[in-house]
Image (cartoon, rainbow, N blue to C red):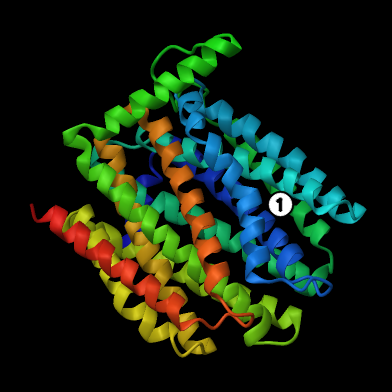
Amino acid sequence: MAVVRDLRVLLRFQGFRRLLGVRLLSQGADGVYQVALATYVVFSPEKQTSAAAIASAMAVLLLPYSLVGPFAGVLLDRWRRRQVFLYGNLLRALLAGATAVLMLSHVPDWLFYVSALCVTAVNRFVLAGLSAALPRVVDSERLVMANSLSPTAGTLGATAGGGLALAVRLLAVDSNAAVVLLGAALYLCAALASLRIAPELLGPEQPLARPRLAAALTGTARGLAAGVRHLAEPRRREAAWALGAMTLMRFCYGALTVMVLMLCRYAWSSDSDDGLALLGLALGISGAGFFAAAVLTPWTAGRLGPGRWIAVCAASAAVLEPALGLPFAVAPMLAAAFVLGLTTQGAKIATDTIVQFSVEDGYRGRIFSVYDVLFNAAFVGAAAVAALMLPPDGRSVPLVIMVAVVYAAIAATMTRFECR
């Protein structure tokens, strides 16, 4: 299989192997932690969760960081990225442990959300750093291949972590706090794995700076502006268009995620554990779509070009998403989960490649941080829109049609840009 051959080639690079290990452990812990939170917020029998409650939870966890997230990229371009992985994962292990204590203590919801928000904020530093560091551990000829396999492997790791969390929750320990502690242990393992990477290997290249707080804030604002100007240059226009397209695709994915959560909770089963098992199945099938994207994207993006591959992914989703989603039945919706996993991850791999080829190393941290912020804002916006459109059981024809129209618009816009 081509993907196995490509992975063997990449694993010859020691730096790539070790960076991949950090990614798998870190994102596996993310999957465990996020599923534990979803189970606690959405599937607790004592909670009558609505789409509005899900949207509110997403806003509390993601929107505050979206307002300050662009500053993370400038810090990533000043700090050694290896140290971000080390101290970031150590901090998340500590914060995840605090979240478990809060779950057991029956504290007010706002305190629980503050703890979860802190874990999410640190997570954005780590994910942006992983993407920015990738060109430092492979050569330019294999960067597309690495962009295909590494983030997809991380996504599969998160999916596996989510599956592990569901298995522990449903089969072993009927405690969300215990699952969160499992995530904390994996964060600690990711921190220890980062110690195998030399501190200077992952960059950035410029000398490290430790300015005072006022100077750091001013420099951060200036650095952010410089990053945006860098992205706005004519020769980087494709990167800007790709980021815009990926943001809208993330919006579509977020809206459908909320819909599937509501369908699993209320429409497809009256038992919360059965609904949680259905959600786990949907996540697993979506993960299979991510893997399929890793197999297909190097070949298709290499022949069509990354921008045209984004257009193909959006067009495929525009056709298949309503065809499979409108029956609101379990089997077609699971097939839609596979399609959306494939098209979303395929477009993300292509977008990562475009950005990394177009953006200079000294700017990658801040650009990928902005990239993550766009993801967060799109997801929060999608949840808010879904909350307005979804009925209590999650079946909404207008939402499915709206998402299909957005996908079609992305496909048409990217096609027009690439054909200039």
Viewer-side residue, 148 vs 392: 392
For label 1, the SS is: helix
User: In the orientation shown, which residue stands out farthest toward the right?
Assistant: 105
Residue 386 lies, in percent from the top left, at 53, 68
Q: Is residue 145 visible?
A: no
* Residue at point 58%, 9% (across, down): 212
User: In the orientation shown, which residue stands out farthest toward the left?
Assistant: 420
Q: How many labels does the image show?
A: 1
Quarter the N terminus occupies: bottom left
Q: Can residue 295 be seen in this view?
A: yes
Horizontal side, residue 121 vs residue 367: left or right: right
Horizontal side, residue 361 vs residue 39: left or right: left
Q: Mark 1 points at which residue?
A: 183
Q: Which amino acid does label 1 sit on?
A: Gly
Horizontal side, residue 258 vs residue 181: left or right: left
Residue 125 lies, in percent from the top left, at 54, 36
* Residue at point 39%, 53% (across, down): 247
Quadrant in the picture for residue 31: bottom right
Residue 147 lies, in percent from the top left, at 35, 48
Quadrant in the picture for residue 87: top right
* Residue at point 84%, 55% (across, down): 103
369 shown above or below 164? above
Residue 91 lies, in percent from the top left, at 70, 35
Viewer-side residue, 154 vs 413: 413
Horizontal side, residue 390 vs residue 306: left or right: right
150 shown above or below 171? above
| Disc 1 packing (10 Å; few <14; some 14–19; many ≥20) | many
149 shown above or below 159? above
